[in-house]
Image: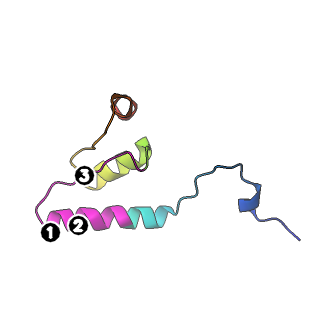
Amino acid sequence: MKKHLIHTLDTPSLLLNIDILKENIQQIVDFSRAHQVDYRPHVKTHKSIDIAQMQIKKGAVGITVATVGEAETMA
């Protein structure tokens, strides 16, 4: 039996469907604009500079952090 690539990954590993991520970001941006509110996502869920940049590029007005460490990382 041939092993699938997924079974060769070290754990823990992040598996991310980038198309769904982009779709989710666009949906919240569209919702925010439709309701005339600023979109400022909290980075505690993804802790990713790349995802935060994607959110800002799509229309977030900034990001929200909970700790100085998160702020330093995102800066």
Q: Quadrant of the N terminus?
A: bottom right
First reached walking from the N terminus: tag 3 or tag 2: 2
- Neighbor class of circle 1 (other Cα within 10 Å; few <14, some 14-19, many 20+) is few
Question: Distance of mark 1 from mark 3, alpha carbons?
Answer: 14 Å
Q: Which residue: 53% across, 59% down?
A: 16
Query: Where is 11 relative to 4, above or below?
Result: above
Q: Which residue: 64% across, 49% down?
A: 12
Residue occupied by mark 2: 30
Residue occupied by mark 1: 34
Residue occupied by mark 3: 60
Q: Which residue: 38% across, 29% down?
A: 69
How far across and how far down the image is residue 40, in percent? Answer: 24, 50
How far across and how far down the image is residue 71, in percent? Answer: 33, 32
Q: Nearer the viewer, residue 60 or 46?
A: 46
Instruction: Give the SS element for disc 3.
Output: loop
Say how many tags the image has: 3
What residue range appears in magenta? 24-45
Judged from this view, the residue extending furthest toward the right is: 1
Judged from this view, the residue extending furthest toward the front is: 66
27 relative to 20 in the view: left or right: left
Judged from this view, the residue extending furthest toward the bottom is: 1
What is the quadrant of residue 75 in the picture?
A: top left
Q: Which residue: 33% across, 28% down?
A: 68
26 relative to 1 in the view: left or right: left
